Image (spheres, rainbow, N blue to C red):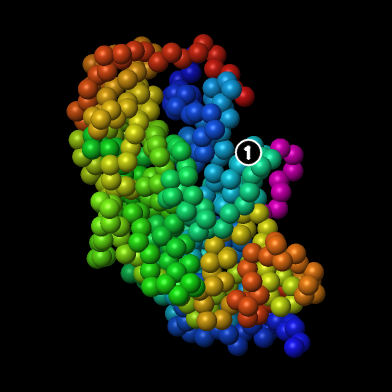
Amino acid sequence: MSVPNKRITPQELRSHFHDGMTIVFGGFMGLGTPDGILQELLDTGTKDLTIIGDDTGTPGRGVGPLVVNHRVKKAIVGHIGTNPETGRQMLAGEIEIELSPLGTLAERIRCGGAGLGGVLTPTGVGTIVEKGKTKLTFDGVEYLVERALRAELGIVKAYRADESGNLVYQRTARNYNPMVAMAADFVIAEVDEVVPTGELDPECIITPGILVDAIVLAKEFKNVAR
Amino acid sequence: MLQGKELIAWRAAQELEDGDVVNLGIGLPTLLPNYLPAGIEITLQSESGFLGMGPLIGEPLRNLFSAGGTPCGIVPGGCYLDGAMTFAIMRGGHVDLTVLGSLQVDQERNLASWMVPGKLVPGMGGAMDLVVGARKVIVTMEHLTKEGEPRILKRCTMPLTAAAKVGAIVTELAFFRFIDGVLTLMETAPGISVQQIRAKTEADFAVSPDCHEMRVPVAAAVQ
């Protein structure tokens, strides 16, 4: 059996975008976010997106420019405070925001990729987060039922990949990327470098290549502010 | 003599115990490591995804940031975590202590720290998971709002971050601890009377028989 080479070009990336799609993305306040893929989404004019991830970035970073340019219909995130435009659009009724505690969000995405329908968490009990959710009590502790999240497209940023899609991250740029790589029908990794399959130490691979459908090199994107 | 935010950070730091795994909120709590008691070593967790946060020494390392998004260091023995592990460590009771700011705290041990209805909706971020999971929760905040209203209330009026989780409160005027669920004044800031604290606190509170003035070092060592 031949080992697949999953490399694609930024141009080939575009066939995986369409209006109205749901995208789950890695990153923490724009750190560890695939900036090149996001720029490509912006340049192609893809719109009516539902996005799932940590936060809505800043007006100029992460998924922030997608929000600023009115490409996002709904965002499921834990934090919008670093992008004032998200708050403005929310109050004006131009965007739907579902706020989820970040630990809950991480588990919802993980569940989406792990074949689980959801998770029981004590986070949010006794707060407005519990509104409309099922509560269960085990051994005297109350839990909220929080449902799994999945997307059509998952976009991650990694430090290094091999040609079969195994991924290694760098420092705090890892964050939600490993969960995101499990929770979508098609997963694209933007990486700083690609090495031949077999060169990454199997002990150190964080995301297994079978979860990654395509790899694109960060330096092949033009016009990306970093 | 320490005053204001430095006094709050110093007093909160005296609650740390050797070996504690600690998560510090943004803002004032990040001053705590400056006032660690002698001989106390702690492990700092950062919500950005690692254990072993330390000061930035030398040039910033690529892709190493604190929860506030600023470059920082990692100490020997530190390790990086993914987002699910970061919050599993918080929620799973592996964090001994968190110190965080709040808008309001009430006598039922509730805190409200994440939104001002009609004004500010930044999102709860990781605060709810942290407060639910940390073994001890210490709130550091100014005793009054900018408008001069009490922040320590009978009942929080803003949306809660978590219910019944606060263990202690440090302000520039007072140190309170919840003892058997009762808000109890333990220490007063230098030159502040119990009567003054009562006048600026809406919540009902007991006064510990051992209540005394904070023993603030003349010049707390800034490490």
Q: Is residue A39 visible?
A: no
Q: Main secondary structure of the magenta part?
A: loop
Q: Is residue B62 magenta?
A: yes
Q: Picture coordinates of residue B138 (x, y %)? A: 39, 34
> Where is the C terminus of chain A found, in terms of image quarters?
bottom right
SS class of the residue under badge 1? strand
Q: Which residues are magenta?
A: B57-63
Within-10-Å neighbours for mark 1: few <14, some 14–19, many 20+: some
Q: Amino acid under label 1?
A: Gly
Asked whether, in this view, residue A12 is left or right of residue B115, the answer is right
In the picture as drawn, the residue positioned furthest to the front comes out as A139
Which residue shows up at 25% across the image and 65% down it?
A134
Q: Front-most of A37 and B214? A: B214
Q: Is residue B71 above or below residue A120?
A: above
Which residue shows up at 45% across the image and 27% down it?
B15
Q: Which residue is mark 1?
A: B54
Which residue shows up at 25% across the image and 30% down it?
B180
* Subunit that carries the residue with mark 1: B
Q: Is residue B160 visible?
A: yes
